[in-house]
Image (tube, rainbow, N blue to C red):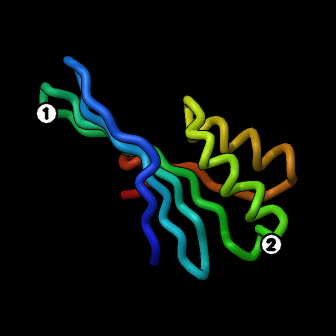
Amino acid sequence: MLYLNLNKGKNKFITWFEGAHFSSKCVRVSWHHFAHDGTEFENWITIKRKYLTDDLFDIFKRLLSKNPKHLIDTIARWCKTFGVPYKTQTWDTFY
């Protein structure tokens, strides 16, 4: 599995990072933040690799390289545009 750090930062309220996990079975892009009051939240989108043809995978990688704002929503719209099935989850819906 390959992990790519896409974005990270910190302000007076939260610390966050965005990353992409690539495996032979799927791509998972996540947004994870830690609030300074101790709360934590993670949101991610999973796309099965079998739905990404080589051409779509290249376009997807270019999308990630642009470091868009609202990453999960942007990827969901991209998937809808290209007819790629995906699943979004949050940390609390996963368990």
Q: Nearer the viewer, residue 16 or 45?
A: 16
Among all residues in the image, which is located at the extreme left? 37
Label 1 residue SS: loop
Crowding near pointer 1: few (<14 within 10 Å), some, many (20+)?
A: few
Residue in the image at 57% along x and 52% along y? 45
Is 57 placed above or below 7 here? below
Position of the C terminus by quadrant: bottom left
Where is residue 91 drawn, in percent x and y? Answer: 37, 49
Query: Residue drawn at (74%, 39%), measured in percent from left and top?
Result: 77
Which residue is labeled 1 in the image? 38
Picture coordinates of residue 1, whole percent (x, y)? 45, 78
How far apart, in angstroms, are the residues tagged by discs 1 and 2?
41 Å
Q: Is residue 51 left or right of residue 12?
A: right
Please name which of the two marks, 1 or 2, marks the residue nearer to the observer.
Answer: 2
Q: For the view shown, which residue lies furthest in the bottom direction? A: 24
Q: Amino acid at mark 2?
A: Asp
- Of mark 1 and mark 2, the one earlier in the sequence is 1
What is the number of the mark on residue 54? 2
The three-letter amino acid code for the residue at tag 1 is: Gly
Whether residue 57 appears in this view of the structure is yes
Measured as percent of width and height from the top left, residue 70 is found at 55, 31
Image quadrant assignment for residue 75: top right
